[in-house]
């Protein structure tokens, strides 16, 4: 049994743990795992490759770029396998921009050429490290000319007469990326469809989202030969994820076009709503955490611990509630928490100081690694029970049969626990472990 621990002084420090035959019916201080009781499959872990991230990446020298790519995508480090792309621009872009400057039913003027400035070079560099990298794409807003407000920013709605053209543009964007060797296997209808933002945003009611998906987006994907692309709804916070999923799926015919639900963390835990959503959509649809980040903390180290613990608490809670995949927001930002064309700076697990040339690998990055480095695509979550709420836990069984358990202690005091599994004729097993204050550990056996 191997243990990897991160706390105040250590970063994934590896050690071996002795496994012993379990005494008859141990009772106290237990964390029990049941590898034969399995739930949802793990589909991937990653972050968003925004234009902001691509721009910051372009400012690095070759050696720093190589280090960054290995940290995120190599087998030795975070092993990111599923990343998010934006369709057109988002707030973490250099400027709002669309793939067509004016309505064009022929799509002859459609072009993703601007994405070659910063986005696609980062994508290609990531693919060079992980050739099996997959992507999910999301629009923040249709072009200004397609909206009721005639602006990409500040909300507004997609004009009714533009549903078909915008759906075709989304499908064409995915096809154009595919032609460049970029596998976009999933797309969401709209980022945060109930938020009027100072950046690119667009409002959809549940009925509008359902209509757009069923009558326009799915047919447009089929017309582009993209039948394999899965379509996900919502892509917003968890406090309304169950409400939106319930309403969209209420139409049985349209429900056939819903392959999953995406969600964000910005309104709080709401793990109960997420668990109920998993029960509603069933085991075959996907449930994906598609975005989350903390506010900009000016690089102060004393802020890193609560941010790191926030990430891990979210991941554990989402996995326990039935999530299949976890995607961080910007994979990389500069020392200011940008660039962003609206000034809404935020944190990222890796930040790059363009003046000093320093790559700042922050504590949240190592907390993410406790999941992404050890889980394999196709792993199944297993049942884990614990004796105290001081410990937050989740576990998976990898396709190879390896068990992976993550244990976090966010308290100011450490505690001991006994990890146990198995019983009956085969005999139980036990390992004596501790959880230091403010630590996270991954145990593999």
Image: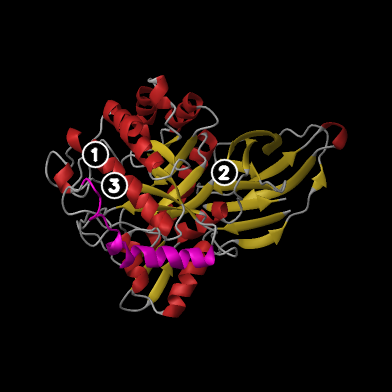
The image quarter in which residue 237 lies: top left
Q: Nearer the viewer, mark 3 or mark 2?
A: 3
Q: Which residue is mark 3?
A: 169
Q: Which mark is residue 42?
A: 2
Q: Secondary structure at mark 1?
A: loop
Residue 403 versus residue 212 in the image, above or below = below
Spatial separation of the CA atoms under disc 2 and disc 1:
29 Å
Nearer-N-terminus badge (3/2): 2
Residue stretch in magenta:
105-130
**Which residue in the structure is indicated by mark 1?**
195
Residue 275 seen in this snapshot: yes
Q: CA distance from mark 3 to mark 2?
A: 31 Å
Q: CA distance from mark 3 to mark 1?
A: 22 Å
Which one is earlier in the sequence, the residue at label 2 or at label 1? 2
Q: Up-down: is 142 above or below 52? A: above
Determine if the magenta segment contains residue 110.
yes
Q: Going by the image, does 94 lie left or right of 175?
A: left
Identity of the residue drawn at 42% across and 32% down? 258
């Amino acid at each position: 049994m191997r243990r990897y621990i991160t706390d105040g002084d250590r970063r994934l420090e590896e050690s071996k743990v002795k496994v012993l035959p379990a005494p008859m019916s141990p009772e106290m201080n237990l964390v029990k795992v049941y590898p034969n009781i399995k739930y949802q499959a793990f589909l991937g872990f990653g972050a968003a490759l925004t234009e902001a991230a691509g721009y910051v990446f372009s400012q690095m020298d070759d050696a720093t770029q190589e280090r960054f790519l290995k940290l995120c995508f190599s087998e030795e480090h975070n092993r990111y396998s599923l990343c998010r792309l934006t369709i057109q621009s988002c707030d973490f872009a250099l400027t709002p921009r669309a793939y067509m400057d004016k309505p064009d039913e022929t799509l002859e003027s459609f072009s993703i050429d601007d994405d070659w400035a910063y986005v696609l070079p980062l994508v290609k560099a990531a693919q060079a490290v992980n050739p099996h990298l997959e992507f999910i794409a999301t629009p923040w807003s249709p072009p200004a000319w397609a909206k009721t407000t005639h602006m990409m920013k500040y909300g507004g709605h997609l004009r009714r007469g533009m549903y078909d053209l915008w759906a075709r543009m989304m499908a064409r964007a995915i096809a154009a990326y595919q032609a460049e060797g970029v596998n976009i296997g999933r797309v969401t209808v709209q980022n945060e469809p109930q938020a009027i933002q100072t950046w690119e945003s667009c409002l959809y009611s549940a009925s509008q989202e359902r209509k757009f998906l069923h009558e326009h987006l799915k047919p447009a994907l089929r017309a582009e030969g993209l039948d394999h692309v899965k379509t996900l709804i919502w892509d917003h916070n968890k406090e309304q994820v169950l409400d939106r999923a319930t309403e969209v799926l209420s139409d049985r015919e349209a429900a056939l076009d819903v392959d999953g639900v995406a969600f964000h963390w910005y309104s709080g835990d709401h793990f109960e709503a997420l668990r109920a959503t998993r029960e509603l959509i069933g085991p075959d649809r996907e449930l994906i955490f598609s975005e989350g980040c903390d506010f900009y903390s000016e690089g102060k180290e004393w802020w890193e611990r609560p941010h790191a613990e926030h990430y891990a608490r979210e991941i554990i809670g989402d996995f326990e509630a039935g999530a299949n995949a976890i995607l961080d927001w910007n994979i990389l930002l500069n020392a200011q928490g940008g660039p962003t064309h609206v000034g809404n700076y935020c944190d990222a697990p890796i930040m790059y100081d363009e003046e000093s040339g320093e790559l700042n690998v922050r504590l949240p990055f190592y907390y993410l690694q406790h999941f992404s480095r050890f889980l394999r695509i196709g792993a199944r979550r297993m049942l884990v029970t614990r004796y105290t709420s001081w410990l937050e836990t989740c576990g998976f069984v990898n396709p190879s049969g390896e068990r992976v358990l993550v244990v976090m202690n966010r308290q100011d005091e450490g505690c001991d626990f006994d990890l146990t599994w198995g019983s009956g004729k085969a005999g139980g097993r036990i390992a004596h472990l501790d959880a230091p204050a403010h630590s996270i550990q991954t145990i593999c056996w």
